[in-house]
Amino acid sequence: MNPELENGKVIIFSAPSGAGKTTIVQNLLTKELNLSFSVSACTRAKRENEIDGKDYYFLTTEEFKNSISKDLFIEWEQVYENQFYGTLKKEVDRIWEKNKHVIFDVDVKGGIALKKYFKEKALAIFIQPPSISELENRLLNRGSESKSSLKKRVEKAEYELSFKESFDVTIVNDHLQQACNNVENEIRIFLNQS
């Protein structure tokens, strides 16, 4: 895949866990923006109600490593030992062949790698929580965090916030609807540039 030969563009979203990134992306997909969601590949076990090819491309560790050796990924990361996540080149091709723009919902390292790969064809958006204490409250309200996992997530969020300057735009998600509107405006401006 040669990104210079394609007409499509890419929109990259990254944020600390609990910042509201996935909610904003889901909202965008309901708008008339000609966007299609990029499905990532991973090696983690499929959860109940998840569908292969819709939620993720579920690969074995061996399949994932094989795909790395064949240079089939735009970017990939080993999150934990033998737990990989990545963006397949064929997934972007699939979306561009439908004459749509690609929307990514990825972690901060993945977002930076995708921006580096796609350069000016990409708009990289960082969703920032209003504060670390608000982020902590949001994670607590999910009811799925233990004290130790909450502490780890907050520490990781503080680390991830240090990379926001690597993104084209930072949107503070203080009020969800306003953040959705701000993101949509940025995307409309970017897609109308060429």
Image (spheres, helix red, strand yellow):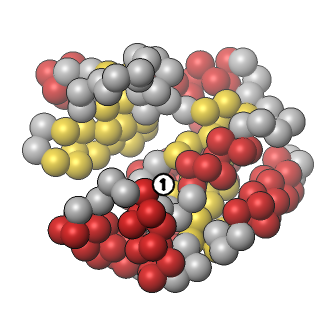
Q: Could you tell me which secondary element the residue under label 1 belongs to?
A: helix
Q: Given the current orientation, which residue lies at the most extreme left position?
A: 81
Position of residue 167 relative to residue 46, above or below, is below
Q: Residue at x 71, y 70 (%)?
A: 175
Could you tell me residue 161's position as x and y percent? 45, 76
Q: Which residue matches tag 1? A: 111
Which quarter of the picture shows residue 92?
A: top right
Residue 138 percent coordinates (x, y): 48, 67
Viewed as shown, does residue 3 lie left or right of 134? right
Crowding near the residue tagged with mark 1, few <14, some 14–19, many ≥20 C-alpha atoms within 10 Å: many
Occupied quadrant, residue 29: top right
Q: Is residue 122 visible?
A: no
Residue 56, horizontal then vertical, whole percent = 41, 27
Q: Which residue is drawn at 14% across and 22% down?
A: 62
> In this rendering, is residue 153 above or below 123?
below
Residue at image point 22% right, 69% down: 147
Amino acid type, callout 1: Gly
Instruction: Judge from the rendering whether residue 165 lies leftward or rightward of residue 137; answer left or right.
Output: right
**Looking at the picture, does residue 175 appear above or below residue 58?**
below
What residue appears at the point 72 percent right and 18 percent down from the top-left corner?
98
- Image location of residue 180, percent across then percent down: 75, 58
